[in-house]
Amino acid sequence: MKGVPGLLIAVALAIAGGLCNWFYMAQKSREHNLIQFVGVAESGIKQGEIIQHGNLMPVDIPLRYAGRLKEVAPTYGDISAVVGMTAYRDFQAGELVLTQDLKTPPNNDLKRDLGTDEVAIWVSVNSSGFMPQFFSGGDEVSFIVPAIGPKQPSSVSNPGQPIDQPTEFIGPFYILALGNRRGTADRARASGMSMGAENVLAIRAKKVSDTQFDEKTQLLLSRLRLSGNQALGLVMHSERKGKEK
């Protein structure tokens, strides 16, 4: 009888060892079940270059870690979607190519981005306080306009010197283009686009009838007219804010 407990213990240890070995092999099997993504070869890629097959290489990622990555990066089986693209930025050796890197400068036909009740209008922005490289088509902005009201009197200490008029925001408005640029500045440069007049914004405006705009557009045009169509200041809205459609 003394040998029975020992035998049972040996059997239990054998089963436990088998289970541990199975678990270890299962883990290793999953790690070696790989999926290939598109990576950049050792030569790297310079901004403005046409991406060739030789600029790319497969990058192996264990399938267990690739679930979320497949949502933001093309697999090596889709390399044809990358070859022939113009690099809009520098790519370093070993870097993964992401889906967002495959975007090209959008078509410059504004009419394709307008609904049946929408039109494009153009507004000049004060270039002394405006950095166009931080804006692109699709951003939401509001315009800084002079507030309506009586002019403020001069201060006692500075007679004859008018006090700055109060201002207010009108918006938000959806940018269609800055000058002739609709995409980001880096993609426009990489595609060889000649950019100009980026302080003139094409914005989307809604109509409520054949002869009238919506309230905020009417208000903006009214303030522009009262100010003698002067260039306006600009406010950028957060990306977290829902885009106006």
Image: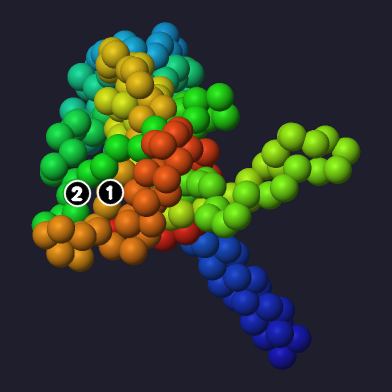
Residue 21 in the image: x percent, y percent? 54, 59
178 relative to 160 in the view: left or right? left
Does dot 1 land on a helix, a strand or a loop? strand
Tell me the distance, in whole angstroms, between the alpha carbons under discs 1 and 2. Answer: 6 Å
Percent position of residue 2, x then y: 75, 86
The structure residue drawn at horizontal position 36% and vertical position 37%, both measured from the top left corner, is 123
Q: Relative to 77, does residue 68 appear above or below in the rendering?
A: below
Q: Are marks 1 and 2 in contact (CB under 8 Å)?
A: yes
At horizontal 59% and vertical 50% (from top left) the residue drawn is 167
Amino acid under disc 2: Val
* Residue that mark 1 sits on: 204
Is residue 217 shown to the viewer in this render? Answer: yes
In the picture of the structure, the residue carrying the numbered disc 2 is 119
Q: Is residue 14 left or right of residue 214?
A: right
Q: For mark 2, give the secondary structure.
A: strand
Q: Residue at x 15, y 34 (%)?
A: 109
Q: Nearer the viewer, residue 85 or 176?
A: 176
Dot 1 amino acid type: Arg
Depth order, front residue of 176/33 = 176
Query: Residue 162 at what x, y percent from top left?
Result: 70, 39
Disc tally is 2
Which quarter of the image is occupied by the C terminus? Answer: bottom left
Q: Earlier in the sequence, mark 1 or mark 2?
A: 2
